[in-house]
Image (cartoon, grey):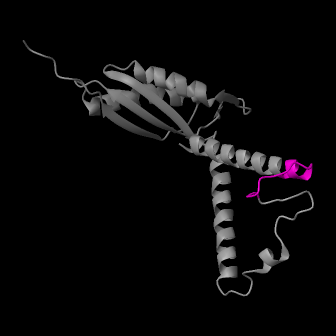
Amino acid sequence: MLRIINRVLIGLAGLGLVVLGGSVLAVGLGTAPPSWWVHHGPHDVLLSDAERTRWRQEGWWWPTVIGALTVLVLLAVWWLSAVLRRRRLSEVLVDTGDGAGALLRGRAMEGVLAEDAGRLDGVQEARVLLTGRRSAPRARVRLLLEPYVDPADALHRLTTGSLAHARESAGLAALPTEVRLRGAKYRAGRVS
């Protein structure tokens, strides 16, 4: 969702800047603008003195300007922090025993863990997401279970099998995991 919002905002901002900049450049180069356009010639200013000072004496003007600018700055800071924040762990630090350590790609560990969890009896689909720090990763696992599977049994097999294997393979002391289980939906069969 954030990726879509990010692309739409960047696209709209870019389109607005291209249209505004292109029109100012065209008028500055001598192209005759339409009668409704903001600029009327190459020596025209964007805001005249009367337009800039029209609302200064009103009591609501400065609080409105400061409030609008504050909202814009807060939205820009939120957007920047949302873009820069990483949701997915890019690498995991594996303890090799020699003190140096090795780096394992986070997506590789996610793929292996998802494949291992997907092989469990009664698991139709498994998805894994690693978050946290590279020295202390956290896992989010989503399992789609067949209708006949006992959720407690599937959770037990996941924690003692796939998650324990991933934790031991990466040399981690702990691998905190959030598991979400969902049952697969099937249509009732017709009886004739």
Q: Position of residue 28 (x, y in %)?
A: 90, 52
Residue 137 in sight from this viewpoint? no
* Residue at horizontal 85 percent and vertical 51 percent from the top: 32
Question: In the rendered structure, which segment of residues is drawn in magenta?
Answer: 24-37
Residue 137 located within the stretch drawn in magenta = no
**Residue 129 higher or lower than 74, as above or below:** above
Judge by depth and name the residue closer to the eye, 2 or 9: 9
**Residue 50 higher or lower than 22, as above or below:** below
- The single residue placed furthest to the top in the displayed view is 192
* Residue at horizontal 77 percent and vertical 51 percent from the top: 20
Judge by depth and name the residue closer to the eye, 170 or 122: 122
Left or right of residue 44, residue 98 in this image: left
* Residue at horizontal 59 percent and vertical 24 percent from the top: 108
* Residue at horizontal 82 percent and vertical 59 percent from the top: 39
Residue 28 located within the stretch drawn in magenta = yes
Q: Quadrant of residue 91?
A: top right
Rendered-image quadrant of the C terminus? top left
